[in-house]
Image: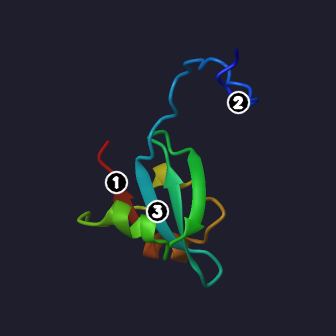
Amino acid sequence: MNDGYGIESPGPHHPAPHREPVRYVVIIDAGGSAVARLYREDRTLVTEVNAAAEEIADMTRGLAPRQTAGDVKWDLPLSGHSAVERAAADVYTLTV
């Protein structure tokens, strides 16, 4: 007798490596609207969300932002933003 009540059981779980955690949150102006761009340690973009999202406030609570988005290491990741936008951006470094 089948104990699945007519619903097929899911297949076995296949372990895979986890994704790298987000290390940097950059709050930057994008055409008059603040966005939060989340980056890994190697500064590859994970996602971009509205900076007013509650999750962004939770992630950055207690952290001091730095205005380092104008540094050379951010040239490629923030290449779509102007120098003025980058200078005004807040960069938060998350503890992992």
Q: CA distance from mark 2 to mark 1?
A: 49 Å
Residue occupying image coordinates x 47% and y 69%: 27
Secondary structure, mark 2, is: loop
Q: Position of residue 1 (x, y in %)?
A: 70, 14
Residue at the left extreme, as displayed: 62
Q: Quadrant of the C terminus?
A: top left
> If you read the primary sequence from the N terminus, does the residue marked by circle 1 or circle 3 appear first?
3
Q: Are marks 2 and 3 in contact (CB under 8 Å)?
A: no
Three-letter amino acid code at the position of disc 1: Thr
Which residue in the protein does label 3 denote?
26
Direction from residue 51 to residue 59 in the image, left or right = left
Relative to 34, does residue 40 appear above or below in the rendering?
above
Q: Are marks 1 and 3 in contact (CB under 8 Å)?
A: no
Residue occupying image coordinates x 43% and y 66%: 56
Residue occupying image coordinates x 51% and y 55%: 38
Splitting the image into 4 quarters, where does residue 3 fall? top right
Q: Position of residue 94 (x, y in %)?
A: 33, 51
Residue at the front extreme, as displayed: 1
Disc 1 packing (10 Å; few <14; some 14–19; many ≥20): some
> If you read the primary sequence from the N terminus, does the residue marked by circle 2 or circle 1 appear first?
2
* Mark nearer the viewer, 2 or 1: 2
Disc 2 packing (10 Å; few <14; some 14–19; many ≥20): few
Three-letter amino acid code at the position of disc 3: Val
Res. 76 in view: no
* Mark nearer the viewer, 2 or 3: 2
> If you read the primary sequence from the N terminus, does the residue marked by circle 2 or circle 3 appear first?
2
Q: Are marks 2 and 1 in contact (CB under 8 Å)?
A: no
Direction from residue 66 to residue 17 in the image, left or right = right
Which residue in the protein does label 2 denote?
5
Which residue in the protein does label 1 denote?
93
Q: CA distance from mark 1 to mark 3?
A: 9 Å
Three-letter amino acid code at the position of disc 2: Tyr
